[in-house]
Amino acid sequence: MKNPELSHAHAAAPDFIDYFIDSGNFLNIAQEPLRERNCVFCNIAHGEDPSTDLLYKDDNYVAFRSIRPAASHHYLIIPKSHIKDAVGLGAQHVPMLDEMEAIANDVLTQLGGDSRTARIGYHWPPFISVSHLHLHAIAPADDLSIKASILFQPGSKWFRTTQEVVSRIKARAVKPSL
């Protein structure tokens, strides 16, 4: 017999609750992206910053120009859900990283940049200016100043490519427990 209180609450709940309650499946439940109210990138991702033009937008990601461009093409790709940085990502996040990289390459190409001469990657803590995961797509790399060349140097302590982040995730997943 169904609990009448649950049935009443269930009747007024959104469709994703039906999926949750009826199927018992706790994965892939539709929900609004997680966000932080004081996060500038969350505000941009949710269309609440009228000064930022979105170059790309879908259900999960947005792309926009950097306010401090290091080259003629400098774009940021962010997930709509608030994720602090790349350090805590797990194997379940690898598809997200791949999607963000694909978006970066598409945005660069569509706006006249060349992904073959680009630096694409994530800053690594503590070298992060905004605590919301963001992928930099910067081209051409030859346009970078000496300082920017250092700040956006793949494989450095402060800047990692998608492949480097994924390798780190995989290495962490196979570490034996002591």
Image (spheres, rainbow, N blue to C red):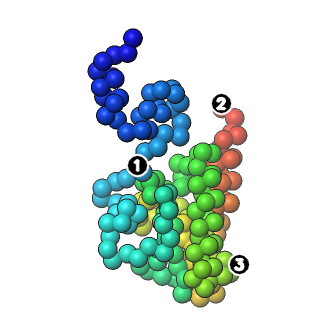
Q: Are marks 2 and 1 in contact (CB under 8 Å)?
A: no
Residue 30 visible in this rendered orientation of the protein: yes
- The N terminus - image quarter: top left
Viewer-nearest of labels 1 and 3?
A: 1
- Frontmost of labels 3 and 2 is 3
Please report the residue visible at 53 percent of the width from the left and 61 percent of the height from the top.
124
Q: Position of residue 146 (x, y in %)?
A: 57, 85
**Residue at which label 2 appears:** 178
Callout 2 amino acid: Leu
First in sequence, mark 2 or 1: give its number.
1
In the displayed structure, 110 sits above or below 126; it is: below
How dense is the environment of label 3, judged by Cα within 10 Å: few (below 14), some, or many (20 and up)? few
Which residue is under mark 1?
Answer: 32
**Pointers 1 and 3 in contact (C-beta within 8 Å):** no
Q: CA distance from mark 1 to mark 3?
A: 35 Å
Q: Quadrant of the C terminus?
A: top right
The crowding category of the residue bearing disc 1, from other C-alpha atoms within 10 Å (few below 14, some 14 to 19, many at least 20), is few
Judge left or right: residue 177 versus residue 43: right
Q: Nearer the viewer, residue 29 or 40?
A: 29
Q: Who is closer to the viewer here, 68 or 176?
A: 68
Mark 3 is on which residue type?
Answer: Arg
Residue at x 64% of width, y 59% of height: 98
Amino acid of disc 1? Glu
Which residue corresponds to mark 3? 116
